[in-house]
Image: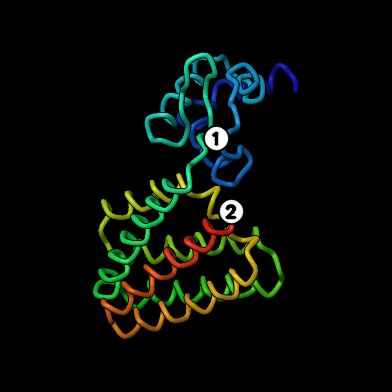
């Protein structure tokens, strides 16, 4: 890296940008549970001083993505089986609530976007590309969230999903998970089309909780 490029990086890499980059990396499993994030190494990598790195780590700690431990620094915290069960139970409830509201508020154009996104999920599944499917599946849920038109609820779901993202990616290794997920998407879309709030709620709760309970049992 040239000094000019390094200087450019230093000028554009704010603590918030670094936070977002690290959060995305953790979500994609690049820093697995138990991994340590060292300030010095991160400063070299991002081409900045340790101050914005430290600020970014403090922000990540505040949101629960990492833990700042005495004498050990920043750690991507492992979750106990009981904690995972609890968190996925809450996520299932939140997603179910979101779906029930979306069934009443989602516009025709939003539903059309959801159908289009489902096509992308199917393409990824048929190609056998688990990482790509995970990306398209995340986008599918994001479109559904927006359809509930409740920003506070959406923010809470996304916050919890970010925390669970590394574990969600691990589920892609479970036999039949993607095929099951695809089928459930179709059922969710149909319930939304009919405006059936109760059915959408139950489908989304099942979509999250049943799969994740199996994932936890398989760990």
Residue closer to the observer: 51 or 172: 172
Q: Is residue 50 left or right of residue 194?
A: right
Q: Residues within 10 Å of mark 2 (few under 14, many from 20)?
A: few
The residue that label 2 is drawn on is: 219
Residue at position x 45%, y 72% in the image: 113
Q: Earlier in the sequence, mark 2 or mark 1?
A: 1
Q: Position of residue 191 (x, y in %)?
A: 35, 82
Single out the mark in the foreground, 2 or 1: 2
Q: Secondary structure at mark 1?
A: helix
Name the residue furthest right.
1
Residue at position x 65%, y 58% in the image: 131
Q: Residues within 10 Å of mark 1 (few under 14, many from 20)?
A: many
Q: Position of residue 68 (x, y in %)?
A: 46, 23
Q: Are marks 2 and 1 in contact (CB under 8 Å)?
A: no
> Which of the labelled discs sits on residue 22, or is there none?
1
Residue at position x 28%, y 54% in the image: 153
Q: Is residue 140 left or right of residue 146?
A: right
Q: Which quarter of the rendered picture does the N terminus lie within?
A: top right
From mark 2 to mark 1, how far is it between C-alphas? 25 Å
Q: In the picture shown, does residue 170 fall above or below 186?
A: above
Residue closer to the observer: 112 or 195: 195
Q: Is residue 197 left or right of residue 122?
A: left
Q: In the picture shown, does residue 62 fall above or below 151?
A: above
């Amino acid at each position: 890296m040239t000094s000019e490029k390094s200087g450019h990086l230093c000028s554009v890499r704010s603590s918030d940008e670094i936070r977002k980059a690290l959060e995305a990396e953790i979500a994609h499993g690049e820093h697995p549970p138990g991994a340590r994030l060292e300030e010095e190494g991160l400063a070299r990598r991002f081409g900045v001083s340790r101050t914005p790195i430290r600020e970014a780590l403090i922000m990540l700690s505040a949101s629960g993505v990492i833990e700042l431990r005495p004498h050990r620094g920043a750690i991507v915290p492992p979750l106990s089986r009981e904690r995972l069960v609890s968190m996925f139970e809450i996520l299932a409830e939140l997603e179910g609530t979101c779906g029930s509201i979306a069934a009443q508020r989602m516009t025709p154009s939003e539903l059309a976007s959801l159908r289009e996104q489902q096509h992308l999920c199917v393409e990824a599944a048929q190609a056998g590309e688990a990482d790509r499917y995970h990306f398209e599946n995340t986008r599918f849920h994001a479109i559904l969230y927006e359809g509930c038109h409740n920003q506070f609820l959406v923010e809470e779901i996304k916050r919890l999903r970010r925390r669970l993202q590394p574990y969600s990616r691990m589920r892609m290794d479970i036999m039949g998970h993607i095929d099951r997920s695809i089928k459930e998407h179709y059922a969710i879309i149909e319930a939304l089309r009919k405006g059936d709030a109760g059915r959408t709620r139950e489908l989304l709760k099942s979509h999250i909780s049943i799969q994740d309970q199996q994932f936890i049992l398989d760990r």
